[in-house]
Image (spheres, rainbow, N blue to C red):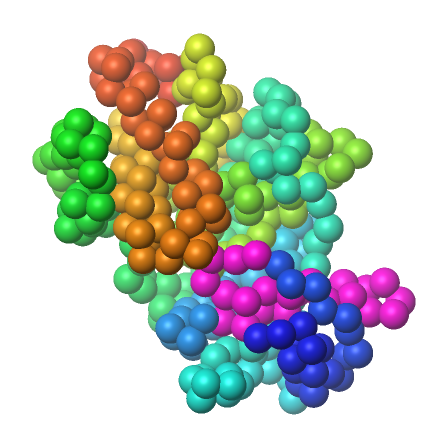
Amino acid sequence: MTVQQAEALALHHFGKALQAHELSGERDRNFRMVGPDGDQYLLKIANPAEAAEIVDLQTGVLNHIKSRAPDFPVQHPVATLNGSYHTSIVLDDGRSSTLRMLTYLPGLPLVQSPRTRKQRQALGRCLAQLDKALEGFSHPAAKHDLMWNVSAAHRLKGMFESIPDLSRRSLIQRFMDEYEANTLPQLEAMREQVIHNDFNLGNVMVNPDQTDEVAAVIDFGDAICGPLVGEIATAAAYQLADADDPLLYAAEMIGAYNEVLPLEPAERAVLLDLVAARLVITVLITAWRAARYPENRTYIMRNNGLAWAGLEHIDGLSRDEAHRQLLQFCLNGDDQ
């Protein structure tokens, strides 16, 4: 898909004469579209392997948030000339794809921003507000099969061979054994709803002039119905730091989340295990994909190093100490 083709699609399906600028992405082809008056949009051409109902799930999520929390900083779907929020197109190679357009929210990617405690607390509160806005949303595709799902980490055991280092493979095996034996059986009793499921440093934008303020939450491509606690566990896994106290930053986010959307005792009890599960998922999937798509290796492996560092740090602590560190800003009598 070229920029010229993207511009032609925008004009034909949305009636907008826009200039296309290519953006990076893991699965979709994305273009920032700019109008003569400065208006900006995001044009998304779904990977042909992406089922149309999954794209519809993402659109439904955004429209639900717009109706429940109209001021929450997410993109809004833009209707085509015939009034639908997505349309089928045929690519040059004959495959079908789904085309859609969203409003564009400017901001500084969190990964490029200075990091502060105030910012991490803002992230936690923002994520909790997002989950409150998503409460009650349902969709036929919400329980789709997704590898990036902390409640199904055990299904990735076949990827162990993608880890060439035997000591690291052994580390992954220990975490997986603990997850299957003790964590997985508890998840069915947890609160469940549709969640963003990928609140990472690339999917949050902050205000360039005030980087402690969240400007946008983007990319609902991994949205899924799963345990609510999996949302904050996934987000916390991306806050682990290369520092003397790697769990502190995650703990600050968790504490702020808990202030807005309190975690239940059973959820707090498995939070550490689900953070570890997300780290395991990250190192397995990224290694597996990078071997198959070496041309996109840099993008795929961007979170691999910190994920390994997080696993190794947690492995070096007793379970009680790691649990205490992670929940230090939301402990109560149930956790002592």
The structure residue drawn at horizontal position 56% and vertical position 61%, both measured from the top left corner, is 62
Does 328 sit above or below residue 148? above
Residue 97: image x %, image y %? 48, 80
Name the foreground residue: 300 vs 46: 300
Residue 210: image x %, image y %? 76, 31
The structure residue drawn at horizontal position 87% and vertical position 70%, both measured from the top left corner, is 36
Does 6 sit above or below residue 311? below
The structure residue drawn at horizontal position 41% and vertical position 43%, both measured from the top left corner, is 301
Residue 322: image x %, image y %? 30, 17
Magenta range is 24-46
* Direction from residue 30 to residue 222 in the image, left or right: left
Name the foreground residue: 43 vs 335: 43
Q: Does the magenta stretch include residue 223?
A: no
* Direction from residue 176 to residue 4 in the image, left or right: right
| Residue 35 in sight in this render | yes
The structure residue drawn at horizontal position 54% and vertical position 51%, both measured from the top left corner, is 133
Residue lying at the far front of the rendered structure: 295
Name the foreground residue: 250 vs 242: 242
- Which image quadrant for residue 335? top left
- Which image quadrant for residue 245? top left
Does 41 sit above or below residue 243? below
* Direction from residue 18 to residue 10 in the image, left or right: left
| Residue 195 in sight in this render | no
